[in-house]
Amino acid sequence: MKKLLLAFFFTISLFANGQNLYIKTYGNQREKVLIFIHGGPSGNSTLFEGTTAQKLADLGFYVIIYDRRGEGRSADPEAKITYAEAFDDLNLIYKKYNLKKATLLAHSFGGLVATLYTEKYPQNVSNLIMVGALFSQQETYDHILNSVTKIATAKKDTTQLSKIKAIEKLSKNSAEYRKACFDLASENNYFKMPNPTEASKKLYSDYEASDFFKTNIRNKNAPFLFYKNEKQNNIETRQSLNKIKKNGIPIYAIYGKEDGVFSSAQINSIKGIAGQNHFVLLENCSHYLFVDQQNEFLQNIKKWLK
């Protein structure tokens, strides 16, 4: 009840400032702080919150969950969906909870948000953990198109090949191009673990039956606003990651071996940045690795930070 009240009052206080930001905390505030940064644009934290947040708290972490302004449960018709707004949201969380430092646990597109934030505000970040996180957008899109082309060619799927050619003609700095690439990936099951375990099936099933799934809100306009208002809309952040590491902030990376949106070259690249002891590649695991292989995910976070 205390956690629920805290989340409720925090939401009200942010709304009073014109920002209806959904936020909830798990665990003891005296423990090490983890802030989960979800994917998107148009994403939310419901899957992570509904499956994993409490379990991380049970390992001795203070876990903060939130949905970015204009995304998910943080409805805001005035949101621009830019990195600057995302930074303001994070800084508001730091201020509200009197945080000096926190570990950023960044998933998918959240990796770009967390990397750019850490580069700008290194004093606020104790660790950066890349969880199936984007770091070279165009390489990801190229990999999706090239790998699906190989699949379609082998199947002699002319419809799919025609679709790929149409996508390649789109502007690479557009929401339409991004959506088309990820739609292709989804159609080819790039986001699904190849051999679901009983544990993962139960986690997904329980989530789909929960209130979290009922509030799995997606702002379909968010990607278009992002590409309209954000100049850094198709970026590469390895230089930023190397700068962060050089400045003494540990970088950790945990990825799924069967995450179809990353090439082996990209995986080797992020491994080289994080370092051998700060990198894990999970077997039989795709994009939502905190569900696909939850136990391994949790144990690695505990090993790195505890």
Image (cartoon, helix red, strand yellow):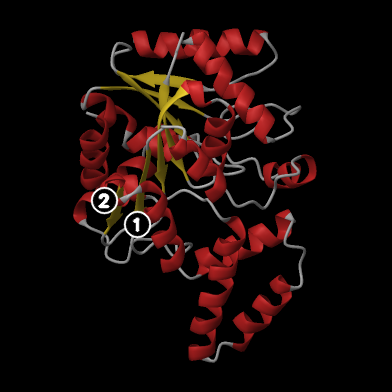
Q: Quadrant of the C terminus?
A: top left
* Whether residue 167 can be seen here: yes
The residue depicted at 42 percent of the width and 8 percent of the height is 5
Percent coordinates x, y for residue 214 in the rendering:
47, 36
The residue depicted at 61 percent of the width and 43 percent of the height is 41
Check if mark 1's residue and mark 2's residue have beta carbons within 8 Å: yes
Q: Classify 10 Å Cα crowding around label 2: few (below 14), some (14-19), many (20 and above).
A: many
| Circle 2: residue type | Gln
Query: Relative to 200, does residue 143 appear above or below in the rendering?
Result: below
Question: Would residue 113 be found to the left or right of residue 84 on screen?
Answer: left
Say which mark, if any, is on residue 256: 1
Q: Classify 10 Å Cα crowding around label 1: few (below 14), some (14-19), many (20 and above).
A: many
Front position in the image: 157 or 165: 165
Say which mark, if any, is on residue 7: none
Question: Would residue 279 be found to the left or right of residue 147 on screen?
Answer: left
For label 2, the residue is 293
Question: Would residue 298 be found to the left or right of residue 214 on screen?
Answer: left
| Circle 1: residue type | Gly
The residue depicted at 76 percent of the width and 67 percent of the height is 170
Front position in the image: 7 or 260: 260
Front position in the image: 297 or 252: 252
Q: Quadrant of the N terminus?
A: top left
Front position in the image: 166 or 238: 238
Give the number of the mark in front: 1 or 2: 1
Instruction: Choose the circle earlier in sequence order: 1 or 2.
Output: 1
Secondary structure of the residue carrying numbered label 1:
strand
The answer for how far apart the CA atoms under marks 1 and 2 are is 9 Å
Percent coordinates x, y for residue 220 in the rendering:
67, 45
